[in-house]
Image (cartoon, rainbow, N blue to C red):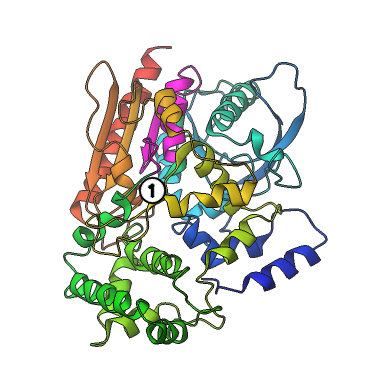
Amino acid sequence: MMHVRTCAAIVVFVLASASLALDLELENDHHLRLLSGRRGLASRPGPQVGGVYWFEQNLDHFSPSDSRTWKQRYVVNDTYWTPGKGQPVFIFLAGEAPEDFFWFQEASALHWAQQYGALYVVLEHRYYGESLPFSRFSTANMTYLSSQQALADAAVFIDSYNKTLDTPGPWVVFGCSYSGALSAWLRKGYPNSVVASVAPSGPVHAESNYTGYFGLFDKSAADQPGCVDAVKQGVAQIAQDLSTSDGRSKLSSQFKSCRPITEDNAWYFQFTLMEQVGGSDQMDNPPDWPLNATCAAMTATSDPVANWASLFQTDACNPFDPESYADIVKLEVPNSNRAWLWQKCTEFGYFKPSYPGTSIFWGTIPLEKLTPICEQAFGIKGMMPNTEFTNTYYGGYDLLATNVMFSNGDKDPWSLLSIREDVPPPSQVQAVTYSLGHCATMIAPTPQDPPSLTQARKDIDTFLGQVLAEASRAK
């Protein structure tokens, strides 16, 4: 995990860089990833699953008069596919990161590609990784970043690539998290492009005032001895310390704050602490078990505040002030944190406020403290996500589609914005759940997998067999 650096250091590094390509320093900064809601992604690229290619993509699919194009990266693995036999094509839609950051969440898709003799393709999302329509992420240039444009990218790519194949079979789309939602929406919006969607942990319901994220923690950690009580004690003690000047000074030292913690920025300090502990259940999957590791740290000694501070002991100081975050995300250098913030501020919300009683954490962080970052980052006065349009456009929880399979872990806070039960007819959307975290059905099996996860993978396998058989009969 990359250690937090000061805002000044990041700015100097970026402005000194001669390249306007993807900046890995910004891409992997732990503080940025934590507060941008991208903690579940790999911190470095993994091995490529196939050969890398480039596709000339339209900039604006919805403006016939705009003929501008850009290069979109994609990866092809033909290890299991034989041309001329009508075997299926599996496409994995990369989400809010470079495509090679999703390698650990493609294990199951590659396994199924081998099982069904499928051609395997990964398509990188516009504005992420090396698929950059512009060399600067100015506000004007960000206009073409949306889920609607990304879905059209996928549909155009599939149509074009299909023409290059010898007797291609049916296409099935996969994703995970945001791209899991994209997967379901691609099947809904472009049913002639893909015959089915596998949509693990896809948050299809857009919500700005999402209190459920931290609200799930005490349930997720209920089986961790002493963890919930330790967190509650730490919350109470830190609240007391924040109420006095001496207490804030002590916390500044304990948590290695770059700038003094004050009455004005205390809420941001609390929010960062909540993200570190309260979001550890999201990726609670084997073999790393981050919730277990967090709870072990929180119960290591009888001092819950010192235990919490141990999670922030890095070589650098920690920027517990909103100005540091705002200064970084305002930079127009291409990076996924700024791109994802744009999508949150325009389409999805996904902000994580905390009010009294909504979680075991501090109830001092209303939505009004979190949304100003949109205006600060992009300079659009009063900028707020249009979540109502997003839910109307796609259907939210009431997704009307066929041949879509969701899977969700009951410890994953994003599961509350996904589909966890079969959607009633006329929709044909199925769902399975298991007792772990985010996107666990897509990672490699381990001996530690609970029976519910093993069964969920079997259910997806059965689903794939059925939809591919139906597609074969329909020829």
Q: Horizontal and vertical percent for residue 195?
A: 42, 22
Question: Could you tell me if residue 289 is visible in this image?
Answer: no
Magenta-drawn segment: 179-208
Image position of 409 with respect to 423: above or below: below
**To which quarter of the image does residue 448 belong?**
bottom left
Asked if residue 218 can be seen in this view, the reply is yes
Other residues around mark 1 within 10 Å, as few (<14) / some (14–19) / many (≥20)? many
Q: Is residue 18 left or right of residue 8?
A: right
At 29% from the left edge and 27% from the top edge, which residue is drawn? 429
Up/down of 174 relative to 190, above or below: below
Q: How many labels were placed on the picture?
A: 1
Q: Residue at x 69, y 56 (%)?
A: 331
- The residue lying at 45 percent from left, 65 percent from top is 268
Task: Name the residue beneath numbered marker 1.
Answer: 442
Q: Is residue 161 left or right of residue 433?
A: right
Q: Residue at x 65, y 35 (%)?
A: 143
* Residue type, mark 1 in image: Met
185 inside magenta stretch: yes
Q: In this view, does 295 lie above or below 182?
A: below
